[in-house]
Image: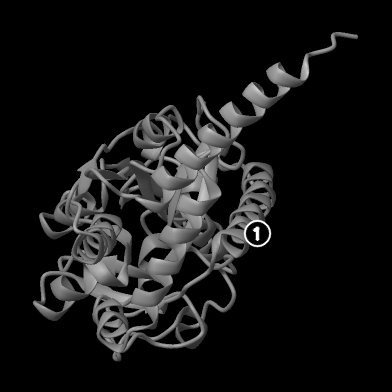
Amino acid sequence: MIKFSAAVVRILSVGASIAFAASAAAQQDYPNKPVRLVSGYAAGGTTTLVARMIGQKLSESWGQQFVVDNRPGGGTLIGSEFVARSAPDGYTLMLVDSVHVLAPLLLKAPYDPIKDFAPVGTVASTELVLMLHPSQPPNNLKEFIAYAKTKPGKLNYATPAIGGSQHLATEIFNIAAGIQTQHIPYKGAGPALIGLVAGEVDMYFSTTATGAPHVKAGKIKAIAITGKKRSPLLPGVPTFDEAGLPHFYNHKRAPYGIVAPAGTPKPIVDKLAAEIAKYVAQPAFRESLTTLGLDPYAANSSEYADVLKAGLAWNVDTISVLKKKGVKFDF
């Protein structure tokens, strides 16, 4: 056993105290330079919209720029890998959705969606709306299912990412409805929606936020929405329960939340979480979210960690069922 002199022990103790004090001061002073807020999708989708809302509020509150950095591709794997490998200092964050714990199960992810990230907190959750190109004859869910059954394998659907929640939802829908459709992946919700409007695809499970304006403009049809109640943005669109296909998509809450690289100091995580929770509690900010068709939802770091783990477990079970049903996830 090595014995140190009292003087050496004092020096080591003072050094540790100085290092701790410096670290604490740096965390208290956070942020003292611009912060990168990554989105794993192309600009134009709901994730980017939420990232910009949060980034703007944080910039205003703390006097440092929170710059949204779109890194689309690979079912959000490109952006997520970048963040997972970034320094855990609070200056690289990511706005993620339910795909965070889904894509790694279907693609070869170079990271672990739980172990390699520090959950910060959530902002909102959303539902999915089944939308059709206006050239499609059906005007409601029952008509569409009957129509699709006459064209097995001939109709196609868009997704904003391979292995994403919309991809999974559509395959679950195909089985529940007894139809066959072909997958056309895009690099983000914005491009996928443009593809639907342009008639490149026949159907698309869009988030309410990105799809509602196009529905109101008459550019696309909306025939059913997931969840237990109708959206205030699309009050004329029935839920799947109302439209005749109950409980087809019993997903766990799919929030939009902030994550950081694993190892990010807890004081920084807590500071970010507390600030974001303040925004979600503000009536004006909540109204901005609901106007986008989002449900304001604030969970702290610990609560968000539980949500991510539950979502991962649900996806594991769901993918297993789909594969047993013969669904192939070709990438």
The reply to whether residue 153 is visible in this rendering is no
Q: Residue at x 19, y 65 (%)?
A: 60
Residue closer to the observer: 316 or 328: 316
Question: How many numbered dots are placed on residues in this image?
Answer: 1
Quarter in which the C terminus is drawn: top left
Could you tell whether 192 is left or right of 29 in the image? left
- Residue 100 coordinates in the image, percent (x, y): 48, 46
- In the rendered structure, the answer to whether residue 193 lies left or right of residue 312 reads left
Give the residue type at disc 1.
Answer: Asp
Q: Is residue 308 above or below residue 229?
A: above
Residue 78 sits in quarter: top left
Comparing 87 with 230, the one in front is 87
Residue 24 visible in rendering: yes
What colour scheme has been applied to the protein in the rendered image? one colour
In the figure, 17 relative to 231: above or below? above
Label 1 element class: helix
Tell me where residue 225 sits by quadrant.
Answer: bottom left
| Residue 14 percent across, percent down from the top left | 60, 30
> Is the residue marked by circle 1 packed among few (<14), some (14-19), or many (20+) residues within 10 Å?
few
Residue 244: percent from left, percent from top? 50, 82
Quarter of the image containing the N terminus? top right
Residue picked out by circle 1:
306
Q: Residue furthest top?
A: 2
Residue 101 % position (x, y) = 54, 47
* Residue at the limit of the structure toward the front, as seen here: 7
The structure residue drawn at horizontal position 29% and vertical position 90%, both measured from the top left corner, is 236
x 37%, y 39%: residue: 76
Q: Nearer the viewer, residue 281 or 129?
A: 281
